[in-house]
Amino acid sequence: MKIIAEMAWGHDGSVTQAIELLCAAKKAGADLFSIHITDLPSYMVNYYGSGEGKVSAGREELDVYKYLTQINLTEDEWEIFAKEAKNCSMPLCVMPNDSKSLRFSEEKINPDAYVISAACFVEVDFLEEVAKLGKLTFFRIGGAYLGEIEKAIEVFKKNGNQNVVLLYGFQNYPTKLEETNLAFLRTLNKMFNLEVGLADHIDGADELAIIVPSLATAYGATYIEKHITLDRKAKSEDFESALDPVQFEKMGNLIKASEIAIGKSYITELSAATLRYRQVSRKRIVANSDLNQGHVLGFNDLIFKRCDIGLTPDQVDTIIGRSLKQNVKKDDAITLNLI
């Protein structure tokens, strides 16, 4: 399982805060760090309306275009950020929201992976641009029809890129528990024969926010993405489903523990611990009463009880009808040297 820490717009327009988030995610055990790079004039009309589900709570009445312009990092700032990511060996995962941002990302950031939002699945030219780069690409499929997902996958295949992971889940500031639907991960995996992951957006204040991602391991998820924020009380952009670094690390530890608990689906040899348990829990053949030397053993002379020594019940047929070499008392273990 790989864990992706998503910053999105959580930097609030500060490259310093972005770098702090990067370092916090690294320390918390994230495997990749996901960022959004956007050229706003290429991405959004300046009269794009405000409203619920477009920005974080408390900002719904803002002019969205103006607000995002204010907190959008410049290309120079992104280059500074990318150098810091390289210095701390944190792989970057970029979601370019437009073609200009994609070209900048590839030329100046050179990320390890890309993310494509469901909104771009019908933009064939854009999909082809990303596909031709040949990099690991996460399809963020929340809000997409199955047909759109299928067509987007086909575009990638036609351009020689099958390195795709379907990232299931969406941000609804935050997403309700009943909309998480982990069981669908297995369906996606079987339907498209691709790796699947969970982009979890449950309320970061809910204790389930660190538990639900670990459950996804049982449904075949190989990636977990979760928003990260420095301090939930600060209510940075995209804070609703974000975890602070301490909680993020706890989530990661639960995921790793879950993987260990789930284990392997195929048959293996019994482990040393299992063999030890088998040894201490087995019943043995012991005398059901006091028996004299020369006595010919019958089934009623024997009983099965927990004992540290002696033959096991599956060996009883090999000793029935044989005589004792010496006297034995009730509950004495029956061993081959007594017969």
Image (spheres, helix red, strand yellow):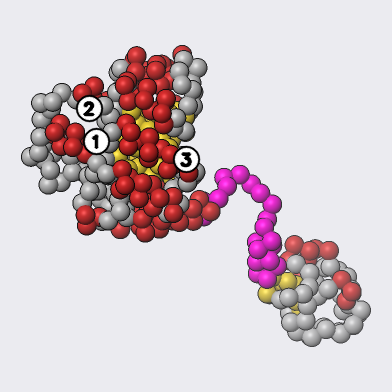
- The answer to whether residue 37 is left or right of residue 135 is left
Q: What is the distance, in whole Å, between disc 2 and disc 3 at their CAs?
A: 26 Å
Q: What is the distance, in whole Å, between disc 1 and disc 2 at their CAs?
A: 8 Å
- Disc 1 and disc 2 in contact, CB within 8 angstroms: yes
The residue pinned by badge 2 equals 40
Nearer-the-camera pick, 133 or 116: 133
Q: What is the distance, in whole Å, between disc 1 and disc 3 at their CAs?
A: 21 Å
Q: Quadrant of residue 323?
A: bottom right
Q: Amino acid at mark 2?
A: Leu
Nearer-the-camera pick, 186 or 38: 38
Q: Secondary structure under badge 1?
A: loop
**Residue 211 seen:** no
Q: Earlier in the sequence, mark 1 or mark 3?
A: 1
Q: x and y percent of residue 228 in the render?
A: 33, 49
Which of the two discs, 2 and 3, sits closer to the camera?
3
- 41 lies above or below 249: above
Q: Earlier in the sequence, mark 2 or mark 3?
A: 2
Q: Quadrant of residue 330?
A: bottom right
Pointer 1 local density, CA inside 10 Å: few below 14, some 14–19, many at least 20: many
**Residue span colored magenta:** 261-282
Residue 86, numbered circle: 3
Q: Amino acid at mark 3?
A: Lys
Residue 72, numbered circle: 1
Residue drawn at x 41%, y 28% is: 108
Would you say residue 157 sits in the magenta stretch? no
Q: x and y percent of residue 143 in the render?
A: 27, 30
- The answer to whether residue 89 is left or right of residue 320 is left
Residue drawn at x 83%, y 83% is: 328
Q: Amino acid at mark 1?
A: Asn
